[in-house]
Amino acid sequence: MSSPRDCKICVGRWPWADHRIAEFGLSVAYLHEDQFFAGWTVLILKRHVTELYELAAQERGQLIEEVTAMAQALAAVFQPIKVNYAALGNQLPHMHWHVVPRLRDDPAPLEAIWGITHEPRRLSTEERQLRLAQIRRQLSTSV
Amino acid sequence: MSSPRDCKICVGRWPWADHRIAEFGLSVAYLHEDQFFAGWTVLILKRHVTELYELAAQERGQLIEEVTAMAQALAAVFQPIKVNYAALGNQLPHMHWHVVPRLRDDPAPLEAIWGITHEPRRLSTEERQLRLAQIRRQLSTSV
């Protein structure tokens, strides 16, 4: 397990605070700063753990429920063809889950987002606030 | 939800039967036919479901335990720097989990495997049987 001291997540450098969507019991959800894939969300585990097998079974059960609630809200807002779920951690081992709705206008719908070369898309403040509000509204009606 | 009738997994065309590692309660584990990333494993949900929110909470809890048992066995065998967990389904929506130990000699340890261009590595029958046996042995001692 890596150390929390040099962890970009633990020290609050990523994800970006103004992209925060909502807090769950074990995790906090943020809109990814690159919205090229509209709705790309990351769920950050509150405590510094790197692998699923370092969690208690009860925590894993709760965490997958939080990932699922997030996915369901994103699906309701974005009406994707498919949702992608991934905990990779190659660059940042602190456990975080990518939840990515893949929309109808996706430029490469068969590929994993990490294989698709693109210019990152930053939302304007107004666009971001609108998107955060949409997702939060959906979360509050479905959780 | 897509139809099981035209599903490559439901009709048994993928993953390859001779790559089968073990059966769990809700899923079956196979070695991926491309072993460029040594130990790359896929856990196939037995029934045709595409999204986490289509499962019952109890099933999600059990499934994440199966993913975790697989990851822990792979970690014991391959001693990875990090394990990657992903359920994408862009090409095959039938739920399957990639569990990928990322080893010390990984050519691009910071990248997702789907962004790393490489020649797929097929094992010889002998190599495959050895690898399957190694993983099964580990699973049987730890589950």
Image (cartoon, coloured by chain):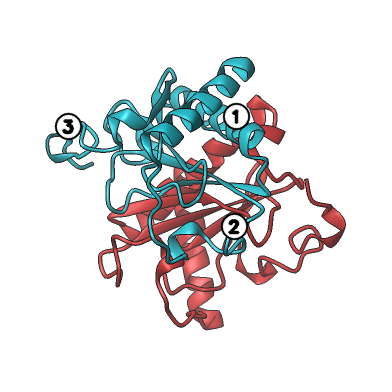
Chain colours: A red, B cyan
Q: Amino acid at mark 2?
A: Asp
Question: Residue at label 2?
Answer: B106
**SS under mark 2:** loop
Q: Amino acid at mark 1?
A: Ala
**SS under mark 3:** loop
Depth order, front residue of A101/B68: B68
Please identify, in this view, whether the residue under mark 1 or under mark 2 is nearer the observer. 2
Residue at horizontal 47%, vertical 63%? Answer: A40
Q: Residue furthest right?
A: A5
Question: Residue at label 3?
Answer: B11
Depth order, front residue of A23/A117: A117
* Dots 3, 1 in contact, CB < 8 A: no
The answer to whether B62 is drawn above or below residue A116 in the figure is above
Residue at horizontal 65%, vertical 48%? Answer: B82
Residue at horizontal 35%, vertical 38%? Answer: B95
Disc 1/disc 2 C-alpha distance (Å): 19 Å
Q: Quadrant of residue B128?
A: top left
Question: Residue at label 1?
Answer: B73
Q: Residues within 10 Å of mark 1 (few under 14, many from 20)?
A: many
Residue A102 on image: x %, y %: 35, 60
The chain identifier of the residue carrying mark 3 reads B
**SS under mark 1:** helix
Direction from residue A110 to residue A69 in the image, left or right: right
